[in-house]
Amino acid sequence: MQFIDAIKRYAPYNEQEEKDKAVFLKCLEIFEDVLTRKNVIAHLTSSAFVVNKRRDRVLVIHHNIYNSWSWTGGHADGDEDLQAVAIKELKEETGVNHIHLLTPGIFSLDILPVIGHIKRGEYVSPHLHLSVAFLMEADENDVLNIKKDENSGVKWIPIEELNVYSNEPHMHKVYDKFICKIKELSL
C-alpha cells in the first residue's frame, strides 16, 4: 500500500516524530482497519497546513467540535491517497481552489489525542488521530467559504499568531514545529 510506504520512507524531523512514526507503524501492523473510523482506538487522518505565498499567514478554520481555530483536515475514511484526502478536506472546509504542495510528500507525522465529544447527535469516545500532514500554499485571493456542519469561520491569520487563535494547548507544539520547519526549509 502506497501510504504505508510513504510513512515508512518519511524521515522524522525530531524525536517526537521519530517516536510517533514508530507508533504509526505499530498501529499499521496490528490494526487492519486503521484507515477507517471503525477503529475506535486509532485511525488515520490527513491534514493540510496552508500558508500564503509570502509564508507569513496561515489559513485556519474555526472548528465546531473543538471550538478553536485550527488547520484543515479530516478522516481517511478508507481512502489510501492521504494527500488527496488533505486536498479534498482543504477545499471543502475553506473554499480555496488555487493550491499546491510546497514539499513533496508528507510534511509531518503526529499522534493527536481526541477527547470524547458529541458528533451529529452521537457520542464519540476518546481516541487517537494518526495525523499525516501536508504543507500547502493557497491563494489569499480565493473566496473563502464556511462548511457549516464542521466550522463556523475561515480566515487568514498571521502565522506567528497561530497559538493566540488556538485554544488547544496540545496543538501549540505541533504548530510551533510546523513554523520552525517552514523557516528551516527557506521556502
Image (cartoon, helix red, strand yellow):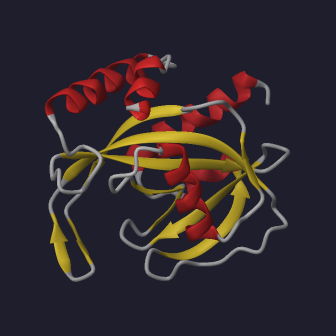
Residue 140, located in which quarter of the rendered image?
Answer: bottom right
* Residue found at x 78% / y 59%: 98
Coordinates of residue 47 in the picture (x, y in percent): 50, 49
Residue in front for this viewpoint, 137 or 167: 137
Vertical placement of 166 versus 5: above or below?
below
Residue in front for this viewpoint, 37 or 54: 37
Coordinates of residue 23 in the picture (x, y in percent): 26, 26
Vertical placement of 149 versus 142: above or below?
below
The answer to whether residue 104 is left or right of residue 121 is right
The answer to whether residue 55 is left or right of residue 95 is right
Quadrant the C terminus occupies = top right
Residue 155, located in which quarter of the rendered image?
Answer: bottom right
* Residue found at x 33% / y 26%: 20
* Residue found at x 40% / y 51%: 79
Coordinates of residue 18 in the picture (x, y in percent): 38, 18
* Residue found at x 61% / y 51%: 162
Looking at this view, name the residue that lies furthest to the front: 1
